[in-house]
Amino acid sequence: MNLQLIALAVFDGVAYAALVFMVAVGLTLIFGVLRILNVAHGSFYAIGAYVVASVGGAIFAAGWSPWLAFPLMLIAAAVVGIVLGGLIERLLLRRIYDKEEALQILVTFAVFMILEDVQRLVWGVQPYFEATALQSLGNIQVFGVYYTVYQLILLPLVALAVLAGLRLFLRHTLSGRLILAVTEDREAATAIGIDTDKIYLMTFMLGAALAAFGGALASATTSVLPGIGADMIVLSFAVAATAGLGQIEGAALAALLIGLGRSFAVYLMPELEVLIPYLIMLLVLLWRPEGLFGVTQTRKI
Amino acid sequence: MTFMSLVPRLAIPLLLIAVALLPFLAPWSKVMLTLALAKGLAVLGIVVLLHAGQVSFGHALFFAVAAYSAAFLGQAFGGGELVSMVLIGVASAVVVGLLVGLFVVRYRYIFFGMLNLAFSMIVFSVLEKFYHYTGGSDGLQVARPLVLGIEMERPAFESLLFYGGLVIAVIVAWAVHRYFDSPIGHMLKTIKTNETRLEYLGVSARRVLLVGYLVSAALCGLGGVLMAVAQGIVTPEYAWWIRSGELVFIAILGGAGSVSGAFVGALVYEVVRTYASAFAGDVWQMILGFFLLGIILYAPRGLIGVYGSFMGRIGSNTASGKEAKRRAMEAAE
């Protein structure tokens, strides 16, 4: 393996990790606050990608500026998060917070099944490909390797911005601190008068928007077709569990670990490519059951 | 005792007879019912773990392991033989169950489910990627095997699978029932209600859960072999996480923790799926999704629970119901 191949593998891994991180961080945020593992999270990712690919395809064909691709991604993510995420939390999840964990997962599984068919009805089964955003930024040469600026610079920067933004939001704003308080101890937070319903709704919309944003960014680099949501949900589960559920900074490192592991596997042992994320997760969980950065829960009586 | 008060007790035998007779009235239903039986057996495996309060999102793994073992056996021995396929398929599911189980019984709830998911995804990718051995995503053909050395025609073989499967299902359901009633079965339930107490009694909760895990792996394996020979093909999709989710779905649909619910759920699911995919191919997943939401939100005890409360309502209106009420009033006085 020469330097160029290593550089290529690292670039692939970083670009991929940035996308996975966006989805996994939303998943982990939702889990931290609502204590629900949201299986429908992959659907938000897929719908975000579909919206950008189809709307983008339409407006660029009509001759609009290719730079509109970037605001379009943000708008799509916000709309999916607020409308779809909001509806699901208000109408469905709110009714199951007191139910068993297994039933909560199954409710989101049912939402996933429904949304999977909704995508098929709205967008059909043919793949969408809309790489205007990718092309508009051009290429760059690093270590003798040509790579797209979009994947090598923009995606990691956006992921870092999301990470920094989330930290700032959670630690230094009132709403963020309320979210942290609820994560820490739901009962105590309710007791001091925090409106947990509002916090739950806000968190779920934020998490869903992050997943949709991940999908929107990914739509420029790959074709959007049925099944991408199902693949992404299992992968982001793996990232979130490797980091420790509820760990935001940990999710970034775990995404990087899994992203790099996967891209090196592509060049070294292609058969193992799909296996690597799960093997990493398995090894980490066997060694540290709570994940890399998870803390052991004390038993509440 | 009136007829109506007998109905609940007779319901299971009556349903069995109805299912056993259905292929005579509608020959096309035989394969569909066999597939439902296969899924029902696997769902029973999920039900065992539900008794311990644990949900596995990767049990399709054992389904696939047994199915592929049967397929390999068939290919190695020019068609193979049914009884040995069943035995070796279940045995391999139990061996893999032991390997995986030794790790996962150390975890509970979400991590239990997640680790199972990870193991099943690993097997799924191996089955899909190593196509020299597994046939890749096209899977492997399973030729119609001999049965104890006898070659059978297709209709006779299908009948044998269905009625043989039905008999096995009844025996297995009874055995699982006994298992739940045995001391180790009660310990399994204690993992859900109060694991600490179990440990205080000097019982290893991990070992109890491991036994339950092996039972569930064996049941999923049995279902997998039946599915493989009934369909004549095995694909990596058998191990896909959506299939695992489907098994959990059916367990909840039938009635969480209920042995008969596993089969009733599988039957209803298979019928709904067959018709929904035939008449509403684009939206059958959506229909199932709404069905699942309806069950969880409005009938958390599943189909068996709906049936029970329906019968209870009828029972209280009949003479024997009134008699029972009167006696209860007297006892209260």
Image (cartoon, grey):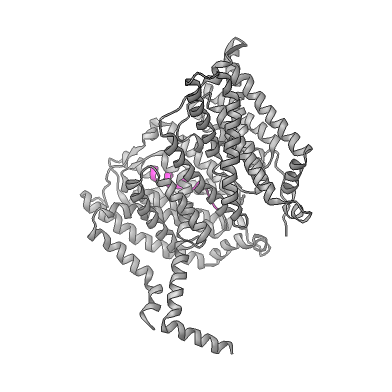
Could you tell me what secondary structure mostly forms the magenta stretch?
helix
Instruction: Note whether residue A289 is visible.
Output: no
Front-most of residues A11 and A183: A183
The magenta-colored residue range is B55-68
Placement of the N terminus of chain A among the 4 image quadrants: top right
Residue B249 % position (x, y): 47, 52
B58 drawn magenta: yes
Instruction: Indicate left or right for B34 with A241 as reference.
Output: left
Q: Is residue B162 above or below residue A178?
A: below
**Residue B314 lies in quadrant:** bottom left
Instruction: Indicate left or right for A145 with A200 as reference.
Output: left
Residue B239 % position (x, y): 45, 42
Placement of the C terminus of chain A among the 4 image quadrants: bottom right
Residue at 64%, 60% in the rendered image: B195
Residue B113 % position (x, y): 56, 48
Residue at 47%, 26% in the rendered image: A223
Q: Is residue B237 above or below residue A9?
A: below
B119 drawn magenta: no
Front-most of residues B231 and A204: A204
**Total count of labels:** 0
Q: Is residue B228 above or below residue A266?
A: below
Instruction: Note whether residue B160 is visible.
Output: yes
Residue A284 % position (x, y): 63, 38
Front-most of residues A187 and A269: A187
Instruction: Indicate left or right for A212 with B160 as reference.
Output: right
Instruction: Indicate left or right for B62 with B225 as reference.
Output: right
